[in-house]
């Protein structure tokens, strides 16, 4: 990776941590260990990739069920009462006091950390890592990777092309759209003109150490080559 590249990797949904006082928000323990609560496999993937690319790294430290740090502060799904068609009793009829508490304790510190890192390290590239379920509404998803982008597609297009060259089954703004106003990349990259992309990985590809290493090695090569293509503009 060129010396001019100052890369930050973020993983908004890296953790499924919910403090004991919330009693798992009324959910069964099994629900805290699946996609409802976090992005399985992403924490270890992000750490691996950051080490390989010698990048800065910021990991979300709380479950998205408490508050979704990849949402605008005014988004109605910031604190969801339903996730994957499951009622989250601990979020139902949440008081304004509790909402403000979670914003001040979890949401704002996370985004302040990103903002501080961008300024201190002169970050000019941000990559956000997420994972998605292999089954959605009873149907198998054949995509293995998804590259999500907003109107700034400069880095996303390069990553997409590299994955396609390697014959990987990759979606362009699939399985989700990347144009969510106020999300992490909108807030910290798009508004600053910083190169950015969001990479989604099907989570069965991240289900053990060996698979995570394989995906890490692939994405290292893809990201490294994509960033080298940007080097003249960094």
Image (cartoon, rainbow, N blue to C red):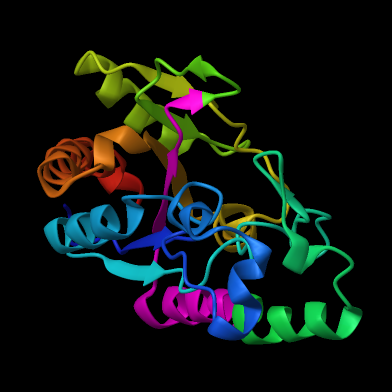
Q: Is residue 67 visible?
A: no
On the rendered structure, is 133 left or right of 144? right
Q: Quadrant of residue 216?
A: top left
Q: Is residue 225 visible?
A: yes
**Residue beneath the point at 15% across and 63% down:** 51
Residue 88 picture location, percent across and down: 72, 57
Residue 56 picture location, percent across and down: 30, 70
In the image, residue 193 sits, relative to residue 16, either above or below, namely above
Q: Is residue 130 magenta?
A: yes
On the rendered structure, is 195 left or right of 4? right
Q: Residue furthest front?
A: 28
**Residue beneath the point at 22% across and 35% down:** 222
On the rendered structure, is 200 left or right of 207? right
Camera-side residue of 234 and 118: 118
Residue 180 picture location, percent across and down: 69, 44
In the image, residue 31 sits, relative to residue 219, either above or below, namely below
Q: Which residues are magenta?
A: 109-135
Q: Is residue 107 magenta?
A: no
* Total number of numbered discs in the rendering: 0
**Residue beneath the point at 12% across and 45% down:** 213
């Amino acid at each position: 990776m060129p010396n001019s590249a100052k890369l930050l990797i973020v993983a908004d949904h890296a953790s499924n941590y919910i403090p004991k006082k919330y009693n798992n928000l009324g959910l069964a323990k099994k629900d805290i260990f699946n996609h409802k609560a976090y992005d399985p496999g992403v924490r270890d993937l992000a750490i691996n990739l950051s080490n390989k690319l010698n990048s800065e790294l910021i990991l979300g430290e709380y479950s998205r069920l408490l508050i979704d740090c990849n949402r605008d502060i005014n988004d109605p799904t910031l604190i969801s009462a339903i996730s994957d068609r499951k009622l989250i009793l601990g979020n139902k009829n949440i008081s304004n006091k509790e909402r403000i508490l979670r914003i001040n304790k979890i949401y704002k510190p996370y985004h302040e950390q990103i903002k501080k890192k961008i300024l201190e390290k002169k970050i000019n590239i941000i990559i956000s890592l997420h994972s998605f379920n292999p089954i959605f509404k009873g149907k198998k998803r054949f995509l293995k990777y998804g590259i999500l982008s907003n109107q700034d597609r400069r880095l996303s297009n390069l990553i997409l092309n590299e994955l396609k060259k390697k014959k990987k089954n990759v979606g362009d703004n699939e399985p989700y759209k990347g144009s969510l106003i106020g999300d992490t990349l909108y807030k910290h990259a798009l508004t600053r003109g910083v190169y950015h992309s969001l990479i989604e990985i099907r989570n069965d590809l991240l289900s053990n150490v060996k698979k995570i290493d394989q995906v890490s090695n692939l994405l290292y090569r893809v990201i490294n080559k994509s960033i080298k293509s940007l080097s003249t503009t960094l």
